[in-house]
């Protein structure tokens, strides 16, 4: 349940598509400085709740608060500027842009984006762009993408695209990130590397809410695990606690109650 100390609070979210109820009172919270797993069977409403939180879908009832501010039904750019940034399961990118250009694109509050400010204060634009370039290089080195900075995104492997998606998020300087299946389609040799990067992000005081189906990854990374089923909150706790719950075993792990 949401508490006053929570960084993110989702309360009684309800959403339907046609005659299908995707979310039916989903309620949970995420504490600052944690990696929290959001798990559940296909159709549980996990990605839909991400869409509601991040502003991609506004046709829902219920409340969303981030860092004490009501962001329910706010536009995606407003949510992002508040410090809550998300990734997507399919990391496509802009096919005609290089890795470095992708990273530069997501720097926050760029002075040069305003024509008037760029004309009257070119020095500030130059200084900010130089700082952003240094930040982009640093993130690329951190994610081991510095050797492909000049490559088009279409030339990257699936795992490299996932790393670039994480880099894009980091360049936005978030307080919290929503990651939708960051390991989907990734070569097993890169899974451990991406997991290490996510742990490092948490160590830099960025909070993570993570949708993931790989239970080994949830066990390795997550401080707390939230389970959804049929558009509702089912339970939460440590990995061991939720996987020992017979309701979770029945709805998610395929164990039938006797």
Image (tube, helix red, strand yellow):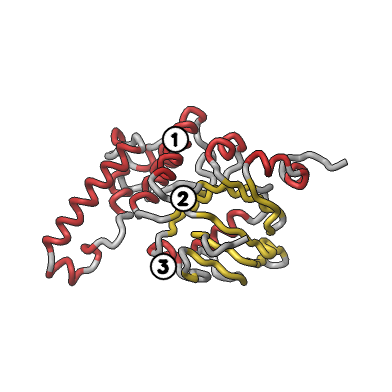
Judging depth in this view, the residue of 250 and 237 nearest the camera is: 237
- Marks 2/3: CA distance? 22 Å
Q: Are marks 2 and 3 in contact (CB under 8 Å)?
A: no
For the residues marked 1 and 3, what is the alpha-carbon distance in whole angstroms?
30 Å
Residue 48, numbered label? none
Q: Residues within 10 Å of mark 1 (few under 14, many from 20)?
A: some
SS state under label 1? helix
Report crowding for label 3: few under 14, some 14 to 19, many 20 or more residues within 10 A (C-alpha): some
Q: Tell me where residue 139 sits by quadrant.
A: top left
The residue tagged 3 is: 78
Q: Residue furthest right?
A: 258
Label 1 vs 2, first from the N-terminus: 2
Mark number displayed over residue 33: 2
- Tell me residue 212's x, y (percent): 57, 44
| Residue depicted at x 40% and y 60% | 83
Tell me whether the residue at label 1 lies in contact with that at label 2, contact meaning CB atoms closer than 8 angstroms. no
Across and down, in percent, residue 182 comes to 50, 43
Q: Which label number is shown at residue 196?
A: 1
């Amino acid at each position: 349940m949401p508490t006053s100390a929570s960084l993110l609070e989702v309360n009684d979210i309800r959403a339907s598509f046609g005659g299908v109820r995707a979310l039916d009172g989903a309620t949970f919270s995420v504490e600052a400085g944690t990696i929290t797993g959001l798990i559940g069977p296909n159709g549980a409403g996990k990605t839909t709740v991400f869409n509601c939180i991040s502003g991609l879908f506004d046709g829902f009832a219920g409340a969303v608060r981030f860092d004490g501010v009501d962001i329910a039904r706010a536009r995606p750019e407003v949510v992002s500027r508040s410090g809550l940034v998300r990734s997507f399961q399919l990391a496509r990118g802009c096919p005609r842009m290089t890795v470095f250009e992708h990273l530069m694109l997501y720097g926050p509050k760029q002075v040069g984006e305003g024509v008037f400010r760029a004309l009257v204060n070119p020095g500030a634009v130059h200084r900010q762009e130089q700082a952003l370039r240094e930040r982009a290089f640093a993130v690329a080195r951190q994610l081991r993408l510095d050797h492909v900075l000049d490559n088009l995104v279409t030339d990257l492997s699936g795992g490299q695209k996932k790393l670039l998606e994480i880099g894009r998020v980091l360049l936005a300087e978030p307080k919290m990130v929503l990651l939708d299946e960051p390991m989907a389609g990734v070569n097993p040799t890169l899974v451990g590397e991406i997991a290490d990067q996510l742990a490092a992000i948490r160590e830099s005081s960025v909070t993570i809410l993570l949708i993931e189906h790989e239970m080994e990854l949830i066990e390795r990374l997550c401080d707390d695990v939230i389970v959804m089923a049929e558009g509702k909150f089912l339970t939460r706790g440590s990995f061991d606690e939720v996987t020992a719950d017979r309701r979770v075993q029945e709805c998610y792990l395929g164990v039938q109650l006797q």
